């Protein structure tokens, strides 16, 4: 659902796109920016704010449409949306005639079509295969919200465990102790899950429990800061191997199917499992490089905060590769 936003000083921006255009001798700018909770689109005439809309991330991907009546009485329609997986563009329409494109030949409704399992046509429209997904954008927003409500507690639990590891390691300077405390916290969650009515472990309860036991054993057996740093590499490669086996030999029947339950679009189970294996390998090697070439304090910051953007970028690349198109066989 698109709604107006609060004051500019009340939000923290992550990224901003500016898309200027001119019409009838006046300069306009569409500003699209992202916060931690929503995407915002604003239409300016010079420095004057004419229109402002926002959409919550949990409501899915939507294209903003700004209506502008110019002095001649003409009504312009300015559409702002994704023209690729990493860029936002605008298209200006006068009636049914397109008078301006920030990215000529690109479709500002690109992401909407991809999220519905559609493929862009040469004309820039989308051929939506509704039986493939069974969802329109409104239903997709409701589905995303439902998935968030179902999975949010496991996400909170993951964040809490990460914060616990970071704080213990930061304030005690003992990475082995931090690893043991983190693993103990994870195993405690496994016990609590037996009595909790909400999902604290996501769709990987059994696998997560096994990895926590291995992690705790590793930390107890090798109580050395260097090997605590190497744990991410060793366990990362182990996990990547398991994902690869599932993707290649079982067509993603276990991990691929479970990952898809969190996604708002259909995926190839084998591709998502293989892709996540590749992501695990890259992150494991990155952890090894940082541990070998930087200080222990920097490694702690890296493993808690800085590796997140890289893993997110790789994850989105995997999703792009694994998405099921309308032309793919069922």
Image: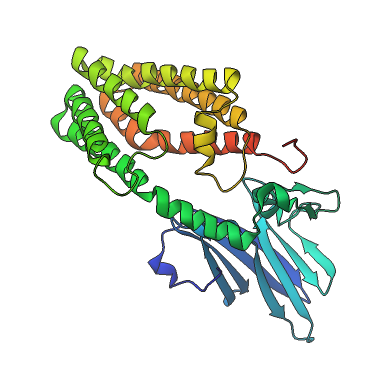
Scheme of image coloration: rainbow
Q: Residue at x 83, y 49 (%)?
A: 121
Quadrant of the rendered image containing residue 201: top left
Above or below for 268 versus 93: above
Q: Residue furthest left?
A: 172
Q: Residue at x 29, y 37 (%)?
A: 162
- Left/right placement of residue 171 relative to residue 247 reads left
Percent coordinates x, y for residue 93 in the rendering: 79, 69
Q: Residue furthest top?
A: 221
Percent coordinates x, y for residue 13 in the rendering: 45, 57
- Left/right placement of residue 137 relative to residue 56 reads right
- Left/right placement of residue 286 relative to residue 101 reads left
Above or below for 126 versus 21: above
Viewer-proximal residue, 236 or 139? 139
From the image, which quarter does the C terminus lie in?
top right
Number of callouts: 0
Viewer-proximal residue, 245 or 293? 245
Viewer-proximal residue, 110 or 210? 210
Percent coordinates x, y for residue 24 in the rendering: 79, 77
Q: Residue at x 29, y 26 (%)?
A: 212
- Left/right placement of residue 31 relative to residue 74 reads left
The answer to whether residue 222 is seen in the rendering is no
The answer to whether residue 24 is seen in the rendering is yes
From the image, which quarter does the N terminus lie in?
bottom right
Above or below for 68 versus 322: below
Percent coordinates x, y for residue 197 in the rendering: 30, 49
């Amino acid at each position: 659902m698109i709604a107006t936003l609060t004051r500019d000083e009340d939000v923290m921006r992550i990224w901003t796109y500016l898309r200027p255009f001119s019409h009838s001798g006046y300069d306009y700018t569409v500003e699209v920016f992202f916060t931690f909770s929503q995407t915002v689109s604003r239409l300016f005439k010079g420095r004057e704010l004419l229109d402002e809309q926002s959409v919550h991330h949990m409501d899915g991907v939507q294209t903003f449409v700004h209506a502008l009546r110019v002095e001649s009485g003409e009504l312009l329609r300015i559409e702002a949306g994704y023209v690729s997986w990493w860029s936002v563009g605008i298209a200006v329409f006068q009636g049914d005639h397109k008078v301006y494109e920030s990215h000529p030949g690109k479709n500002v409704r690109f992401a909407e079509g991809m999220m519905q399992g559609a493929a862009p046509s040469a004309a820039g429209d989308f051929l939506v295969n509704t039986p493939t997904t069974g969802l329109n954008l409104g239903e997709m927003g409701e589905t995303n919200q439902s998935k968030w409500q179902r999975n949010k507690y496991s996400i909170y639990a993951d964040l809490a465990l990460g914060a616990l590891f970071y704080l213990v390691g930061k304030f005690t300077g003992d990475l082995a102790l931090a690893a043991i405390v983190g693993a103990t916290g994870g195993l405690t969650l496994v016990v609590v899950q037996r009595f909790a009515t909400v999902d604290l472990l996501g769709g990987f309860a059994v696998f997560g429990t096994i990895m926590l036991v291995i992690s705790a054993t590793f930390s107890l057996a090798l109580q050395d800061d260097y090997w605590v740093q190497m744990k991410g590499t060793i366990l990362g490669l182990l996990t990547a191997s398991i994902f690869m086996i599932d993707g290649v030999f079982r067509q993603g029947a276990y991990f691929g199917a479970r990952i898809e339950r969190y996604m708002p679009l259909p995926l190839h189970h084998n591709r998502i499992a293989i892709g996540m294996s590749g992501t695990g390998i890259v992150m494991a090697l990155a952890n090894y490089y940082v541990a070998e070439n930087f200080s222990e304090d920097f490694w702690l910051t890296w493993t808690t905060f800085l590796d997140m953007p890289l893993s997110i970028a790789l994850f989105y690349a995997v999703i792009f590769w694994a998405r099921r198109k309308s032309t793919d066989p069922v």
